[in-house]
Each structure stands twice: as structure tokens, then as C-alpha cells.
Amino acid sequence: MEVLRRQLLELQEENKALQGVVAASDEREREVKSGRLAMVKERTERLQELIDTTVARNEQLERDYDKLNAHAKQLTATVQGVVTERKELEQELRGVEQEQREPLGQARAAGERRERQATVQTVEGPGGDAR
């Protein structure tokens, strides 16, 4: 019986030692899990900050794009106006050049025709009646 009692005491001591080992192992596991959880939370916060920064930057880029697009439309309208004006000026210039190329006789004849028409209108009056 004494042997059994000693074996029982030894088993109880081993059981206490094993319980201590299990408790230490459980504590270590909790620490590891806690550390992992902290790392996951930290990474989650960092990713959220990056997402927030990216969203804010994207919104700013959209505003900048809208401003640039509006400016581009204004520039396009200005360029179209300048092109139209240039075409009109070129057409006017061609008319002037054509007049300059007319032989002197044709220019005199045209001028004389204009003078005669003015004289006839003065003499006849606007309705064609002679005064």
C-alpha cells in the first residue's frame, strides 16, 4: 500500500507539473494569438489609411480633371473662333489681291461705271424720275 500511495503522490505531482506545462502552453498560445491579432489590426488600420488616402487623391484628381476638361473646352472654342476669323481674313485678302490683279483699264472702267451710276441716280432721283 505504501508503494501505491507513493505512486499516487508521484502521479499527482506529475499531474500538477503537466497542468503547469499545459497552462504555460495555453498562456503562450494566447500571447501568440494576441500578437497575431495586434499585427492584423495594425495592418488593417494601415490598409484603411492607404485606402482613405487613395480615395482622397482620386477625388482630387477627378476635380483637377474636370477643371482641365473645362479649360480645354474653352481653348477649343477660342481656337475655333480664331480659325473662323482667319478663314474670313484669308477670303478678304484673296478678294483684295484679286482686285489688285485686275488690269488698270478694268479698274478704271469699273470706277467709271460706278461714277456714272452715281450721277444717274443724282440726276434721276431714287425712283428713276428726272429732276
Image (cartoon, rainbow, N blue to C red):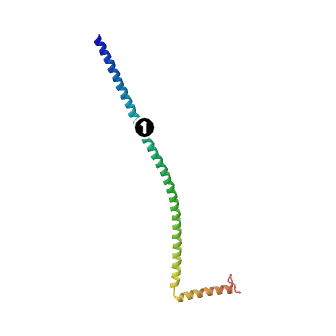
Q: Position of residue 29 (x, y in %)?
A: 37, 31
Q: Which residue is mark 1?
A: 38
**In the current view of this chain or complex, which residue is farthest to the right?**
131
Residue at x-position 36% and y-position 25%: 20
| 130 left or right, relative to 61 | right
**In the current view of this chain or complex, which residue is farthest to the left?**
3
Q: Quadrant of the C terminus?
A: bottom right
Residue at x-position 29% and y-position 11%: 2
Q: Quadrant of the N terminus?
A: top left
Q: Is residue 111 above or below residue 5?
A: below
Q: Residues within 10 Å of mark 1 (few under 14, many from 20)?
A: few
| 17 left or right, relative to 129 | left
Q: Is residue 63 above or below residue 105?
A: above
Q: Position of residue 9 (x, y in %)?
A: 32, 16
> Is 89 in front, or is 126?
89
> Is 119 in front, or is 99?
99
**What amino acid type is highlighted by mark number 1?**
Ala
Q: Is residue 129 above or below residue 84?
A: below
